[in-house]
């Protein structure tokens, strides 16, 4: 039998004030650790959620202050800690750094960096006057899937808009993922209709836990962003087992990898997919 561990999805309302964001995140991570969480995840844009034109200028490397703070916090509390995403300093394009990466970083209980995932699918949409973004103007896409073995299970790392591409999750499960992380800053407009059904679908079809920490509320980017919130933890049968209320807070739930194995054995979707002919 696998060990049952407690996981926490941290919900934040981040702004352009990096120190205030850090203080809020640290307080909630410490609360989760005190409650016994062995795995804690924060949302997309944990370190900065403000005017887009500032993202590239303020971006840091993996050895910068943001990652150092989270590594130290993971070590202090002996937890697996996912920095849902931060603006990672990009590479030069024509002699100039014009874009950053939207990057998740997983730290282990000793503060070691276990995995880095750079968001593949960028949020370039024109849904309505209220929801029009071109993330690719300031972020470069990643090009590698990431599954990492940890003592809490095999984690498949993704970020926000990735959730609309089920083929990505088929690949992550094929690489062994048992737990899918989807840190997000989902807009209010799309969130009220799509957040729950998309995340439940990813859990059901992947037969995996989904941990989706989210941004919630209004941010100080001239009124351009209002995040839906409702951080979720969903089990492999698609049941929502934890959710956060409005504003900063926590969603806490037990992760039982035996349930993943039993669900997959009872309905061997991956085997059926592999043997199907279309």
Image (tube, helix red, strand yellow):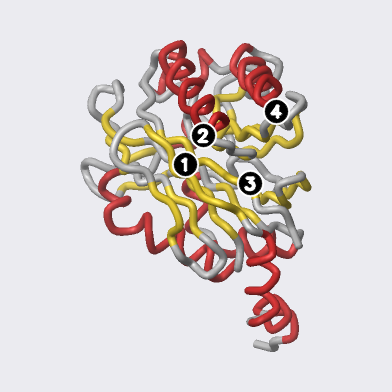
User: Which of the two residues, 40 or 83, is positioned nearer the viewer here?
Assistant: 40
Circle 4 residue: 78
Whole-Å distance between the Cαs marked 3 and 4?
21 Å
Front residue (pair 192, 9): 9
SS label for mark 2? loop
> Mark 1 falls on what kind of element?
loop
> Which of pointers 3 and 4 lies earlier in the amino acid sequence?
4
Q: Split into 4 quadrants, where in the image is the N terminus?
A: bottom right
Residue indicated by mark 3: 157
Q: Residue at x 59, y 47 (%)?
A: 158
Q: Is residue 27 visible?
A: yes
Disc 4, SS: loop
Task: Look at the numbered discs 2 and 1 and tell me whether their residues touch, using CB distance below 8 Å.
Answer: yes
Of marks 1 and 4, which one's residue comes earlier in the chain? 4
Give the x, y percent position of residue 61: 66, 18
**Quarter of the image holding residue 94?**
top right
- Give the CA separation, mark 1 to mark 4: 20 Å
What residue appears at the point 57 percent right and 31 percent down from the top-left corner? 33
Residue 262 percent coordinates (x, y): 67, 73
Q: Earlier in the sequence, mark 4 or mark 2?
A: 2
């Amino acid at each position: 039998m696998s060990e049952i561990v407690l996981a926490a999805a941290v919900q934040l309302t981040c702004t352009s004030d990096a120190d205030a964001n850090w203080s809020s995140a640290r307080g909630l991570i410490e609360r989760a650790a005190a409650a016994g969480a062995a795995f804690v995840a924060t949302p997309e844009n944990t370190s900065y959620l403000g005017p887009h034109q500032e993202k590239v200028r303020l971006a840091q490397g993996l050895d910068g202050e943001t990652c150092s703070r989270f590594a130290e916090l993971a070590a202090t509390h002996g937890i697996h800690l996912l920095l849902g995403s931060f603006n990672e300093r990009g590479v030069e394009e024509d002699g100039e750094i014009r874009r950053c990466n939207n990057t998740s970083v997983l730290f282990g209980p000793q503060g070691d960096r276990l995995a880095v995932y750079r968001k593949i699918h960028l949020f370039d949409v024109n849904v309505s006057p209220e929801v029009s973004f071109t993330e690719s103007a300031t972020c470069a896409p990643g090009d590698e899937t990431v599954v990492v073995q940890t003592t809490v299970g095999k984690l498949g790392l993704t970020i926000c808009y990735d959730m609309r591409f089920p083929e990505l999750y088929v690949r992550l499960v094929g690489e062994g993922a048992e737990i899918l992380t989807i840190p997000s800053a989902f807009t209010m407009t799309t969130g009220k209709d799509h957040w729950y059904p998309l995340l439940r679908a990813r859990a059901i079809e992947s037969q995996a836990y989904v941990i989706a920490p989210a941004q919630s509320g209004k941010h100080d980017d001239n009124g351009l962003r209002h995040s839906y919130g409702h951080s979720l933890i969903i089990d492999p049968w698609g049941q929502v087992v934890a959710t956060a209320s409005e504003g900063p807070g926590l969603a806490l739930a037990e992760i039982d990898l035996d349930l993943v194995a039993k669900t997959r054995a009872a309905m061997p979707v991956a085997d059926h997919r592999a043997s199907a002919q279309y």
